[in-house]
Image (spheres, grey):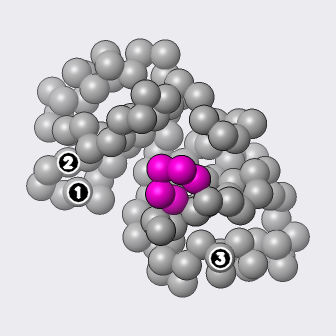
């Protein structure tokens, strides 16, 4: 299993203001679903940050997202090791397959793969 990118998810009630602020540092909007917006560096596209008002389908807002090349394998490993699954593995309407797991620090990690 390979990690493709790691993105911090910042809870925000000021999503548009955040876009403007981080735009001053060179970030550009690459995704906006209304409830989550992702900004990326044009010169280094894997350098990203997301701002979330809430998560659309999960009971909690994750602290970070980790994109992997095989989300089913990641889910199997986490379950085998007894990790706390916070949100079950499922396909989302916006084109990702994902689950949430709690890390040893209590942080919620959104583990995803694109379909």
Where does the image place residue 58, in percent across and percent down from the top left? 70, 41
> Which one is earlier in the sequence, the residue at label 3 or at label 2?
2
10 to the left or right of 83: left
Q: CA distance from mark 1 to mark 2?
A: 5 Å
Q: Magenta stretch: residue 94 in it?
A: yes
Q: Secondary structure at mark 3?
A: helix
Q: Mark yes or no: residue 40 visible.
A: yes
CA separation, marks 3 and 2?
A: 29 Å
Residue bearing the label numbered 2:
41
Label pair 3/2, CB-CB below 8 angstroms: no
Residue at x 74%, y 79% (from the top left corner): 77
Residue range of the region highlighted in magenta in the rendering: 92-96
Position of the N terminus, as image quadrant, is bottom right
* Residue 19 belongs to the span the image colors magenta: no
Magenta segment, prevailing SS (helix, strand or loop): loop
- Label ID, residue 68: none
Q: Mark 1: few, some, or many residues within 10 Å (few <14, many ≥20)?
A: few
Label 2, secondary structure: give it: loop
The extreme front residue here reads 93
Q: Which residue is mark 1?
A: 45
Number of marks in the rendered image:
3
Relative to residue 32, is residue 44 drawn left or right?
left
Residue 79 horizontal side relative to residue 39, left or right: right
112 shown above or below 36: below
Do we see residue 104 in this rendering?
no
Circles 1 and 2 in contact, beta carbons < 8 Å: yes
Helix, strand or loop under label 1: loop
Check disc 3 and report the residue beneath it. Answer: 72
Residue beneath the point at 15% across and 27% down: 24
Q: Earlier in the sequence, mark 3 or mark 1?
A: 1
Residue 42 placement (x, y as % from top left): 14, 50
Q: Would you place residue 91 above or below residue 107 in this image?
A: below
């Amino acid at each position: 299993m390979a990690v493709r990118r790691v993105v911090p998810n910042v809870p925000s009630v000021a999503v548009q203001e955040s876009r403007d602020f981080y735009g001053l540092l060179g970030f550009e909007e690459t995704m906006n679903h209304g409830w989550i917006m992702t900004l990326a560096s044009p010169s280094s596209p894997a350098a990203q940050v997301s701002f979330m008002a809430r998560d659309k389908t999960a009971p909690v807002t994750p602290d970070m997202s980790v994109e992997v090349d095989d989300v089913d394998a990641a889910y199997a490993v986490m379950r085998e090791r007894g990790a706390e699954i916070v949100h079950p593995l499922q396909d989302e309407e916006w084109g990702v397959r994902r689950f949430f797991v709690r890390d040893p620090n209590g942080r919620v990690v959104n583990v995803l793969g694109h379909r």
